[in-house]
Image (cartoon, rainbow, N blue to C red):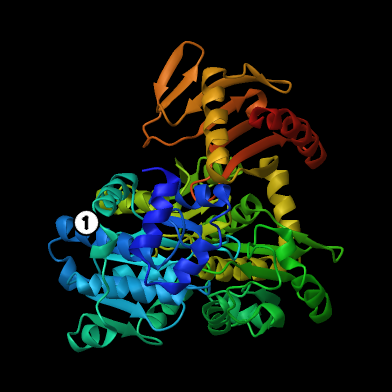
């Protein structure tokens, strides 16, 4: 079916929906917009669905949410015979339509005979992940588009382990969705669902209290925050999202009394009026927080995204300047804090393990080696770190200590299987107190880590290529790099190419299996330990370029990075 046929079919099939008819009629003379809305179905990948809100097959809307849920319900009933009784827990963030999409998800599950646990108000993604395991549910659904701009929303699916679905399960869900007709994706009336006991609302503290206690138990310097927490001053911004209550609560209960919230960004608001995108990866997210920190004398600024799975830090250096840290720098600080604290208290397990995505800093390897901790690389996507945690538990091979992605995701718990900004905020506060005890700042501690293990200059560049043409361009770039692999990038010889799509590492004529699930990623190992990686985003119409350089001094690492970045950009043309 071509785009115009699909467009007209929606107008016919949903002619009783006045809002839909009005919106689709408004684009009748815009063939590019019609194409973008109808050239494909909104894909259900390993991160679920995510897209711009609106009507069409390639948009987030009630119809696609209900259809996805109906297909997911059929997958659940075929994969877990007890899923109807165990149920599915559903959470949502502050985005436009999130609460409505969450309720529609719950009521479609009820119509298919599956019990639905629905949070009565917004919650962070890590609380949803925790709740799946805590309530012994068969699965979970989070309505969120994480850090994307306000036009987006999404639908993330979690398995019974509390981690996002892996590729094989996601493929089966996709098949079930494709076999589901929109007309069959019906929602049970709420009153009926409540009367039959199929819908249960989760109120305040039914899960939250246990979750907060779990996060508090993750402190690795016993008593430090009770002792010094009152001396630490923090500015916090939830960026209009779901982190406001749990982050402030966990910091307060841990012993940190001086937490000042950015008032303009405190309340949930899906329009995100103070930022272009509610993303703590973007230094602009701290533009309101830094003047406030200067006013109250805070040494640490914490920011979390709308679903509170990403955490960003801006810290004051020894001269009083506030410096925004990147995700790799934050990870190095938290990893070092955990391992050094456990070592100091003689609690570092002999089989300790950390995990990171393949595109995250190699500085972690040096830190782990120094403490005798194993480091495991995973594909990008925190679900793969979740899989490693489960693997460690199943074969009792390692004790999980910390996992991270350079995209500002961190976890030190096994009770949650996704990145957790509440967990990370508490660890950052504890690390800041540990530094304060030594008379230094977090930034000075970062420099100490670099001095000991080597300097890394690292950054991720994203190029947005929207629509059908953009999708084709991204595919063309990746195809060209595979067929015409560069022998050098800038001044550096390519020593080896890891092609995660084929699952092979190629070094000259030698080929070695990578042993991972296929993924559209190309990783170039360069002379001197530097590396470059290219991959399409799994959640946005972007292609991502990762450039990492290492040296003995900060200036040298930065100079190498600047040159390598310019050379690497040519690969995206």
Where is residue 26 drawn, in percent x and y? Answer: 55, 63
- In this rendering, the answer to whether 337 lies above or below 93 is above
**Outermost residue toward the right?**
319
**Is 342 placed left or right of 384 in the picture?**
right
**Outermost residue toward the left?**
81
**Is 240 placed left or right of 220 in the picture?**
right
- In this rendering, the answer to whether 522 lies above or below 118 is above
**Outermost residue toward the top?**
509
Residue at 78 percent of width and 42 percent of height: 554
Residue at 70 percent of width and 32 percent of height: 569
Where is residue 197 drawn, in percent x and y? Answer: 19, 84
Can you identify the residue that label 1 sits on? 75
Q: Quadrant of residue 359?
A: top right
- Work out whether residue 11 or residue 423 is closer to the camera in this orientation and state it: 11
Q: Is residue 414 visible?
A: no
Quarter containing the C terminus: top right
**Is 289 placed left or right of 42 in the picture?**
right
Residue at 55 percent of width and 80 percent of height: 254
Where is residue 335 drawn, in percent x and y? Answer: 56, 55
- In this rendering, the answer to whether 400 lies above or below 374 is below
Q: SS for tag 1?
A: helix
Q: Quadrant of residue 523?
A: top right
- Give neighbour class at mark 1: few <14, some 14-19, many 20+ (Cα, 10 Å): many
**Is 237 placed left or right of 112 in the picture?**
right
- In this rendering, the answer to whether 493 lies above or below 474 is above
Q: Is residue 296 visible?
A: yes
């Amino acid at each position: 079916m071509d785009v115009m046929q699909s467009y007209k079919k929606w107008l016919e099939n949903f002619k009783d929906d006045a809002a839909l008819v009005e919106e689709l009629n408004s684009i009748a003379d815009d063939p590019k917009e019609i194409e973008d809305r109808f050239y494909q179905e909104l894909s259900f990948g390993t991160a679920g669905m995510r897209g711009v809100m609106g009507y069409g097959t390639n948009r987030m809307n009630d119809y696609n949410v209900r259809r996805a849920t109906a297909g997911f319900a059929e997958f659940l009933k075929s994969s877990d015979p007890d899923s109807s009784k165990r149920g599915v827990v559903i959470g949502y963030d502050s985005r436009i339509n999130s609460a409505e999409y969450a309720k529609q998800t719950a009521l479609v599950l009820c119509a298919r005979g599956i019990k639905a646990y629905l949070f009565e108000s917004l919650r962070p993604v890590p609380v949803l992940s925790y709740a799946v395991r805590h309530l012994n549910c068969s699965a979970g659904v989070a309505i969120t588009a994480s850090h994307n701009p306000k036009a987006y929303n999404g639908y993330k699916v979690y398995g019974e382990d509390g981690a996002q679905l892996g590729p094989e399960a996601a493929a089966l869900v996709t098949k079930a969705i494709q076999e589901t007709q929109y007309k069959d994706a019906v929602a049970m009336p709420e009153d009926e669902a409540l009367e039959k006991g199929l819908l249960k609302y989760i109120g305040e503290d039914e899960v939250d209290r246990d979750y907060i206690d779990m996060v508090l138990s993750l402190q690795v310097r016993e008593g430090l925050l009770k002792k010094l927490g009152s001396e630490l001053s923090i500015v916090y911004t939830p960026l209009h999202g779901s982190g406001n209550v749990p982050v402030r609560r966990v910091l307060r209960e841990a012993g940190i009394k001086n937490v000042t919230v950015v008032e303009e960004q405190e309340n949930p608001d899906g329009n995100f009026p103070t930022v272009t995108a509610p993303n703590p990866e973007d230094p602009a997210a701290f533009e309101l927080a830094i003047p406030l920190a200067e006013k109250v004398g805070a040494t640490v600024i914490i920011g979390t995204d709308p679903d509170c799975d990403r955490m960003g830090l801006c810290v004051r250096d020894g001269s009083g300047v506030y410096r925004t840290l990147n995700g790799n720098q934050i990870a190095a600080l938290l990893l070092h804090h955990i391992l050094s604290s456990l070592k100091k208290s003689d609690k570092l397990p002999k089989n300790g393990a950390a995990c990171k995505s393949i595109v995250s800093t190699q500085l972690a390897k040096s830190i782990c080696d120094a403490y005798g901790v194993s480091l495991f690389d995973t594909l990008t996507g925190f679900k793969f770190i979740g899989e490693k945690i489960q693997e460690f538990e199943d074969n009792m091979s390692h004790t999980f200590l910390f996992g991270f992605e350079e995209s500002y995701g961190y976890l030190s718990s096994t009770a949650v299987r996704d990145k957790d900004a509440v967990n990370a905020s508490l660890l950052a506060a504890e690390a800041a107190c540990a530094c304060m005890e030594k008379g230094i700042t977090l930034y000075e501690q970062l420099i100490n880590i670099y001095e000991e293990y080597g300097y890394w200059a690292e950054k991720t560049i994203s190029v947005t290529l929207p629509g059908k043409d953009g999708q084709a361009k991204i595919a063309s770039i990746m195809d060209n790099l595979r067929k015409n692999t560069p022998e050098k990038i800038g001044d550096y010889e390519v020593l080896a190419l890891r092609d995660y799509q084929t699952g092979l590492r190629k070094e000259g004529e030698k080929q070695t299996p990578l042993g991972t699930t296929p993924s559209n990623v190309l990783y170039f190992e360069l002379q001197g330990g530097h590396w470059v990686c290219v991959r399409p985003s799994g959640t946005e119409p972007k292609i991502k370029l990762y450039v990492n350089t290492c040296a003995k001094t900060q200036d040298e690492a930065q100079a190498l990075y600047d040159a390598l970045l310019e050379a690497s950009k040519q690969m995206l043309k």
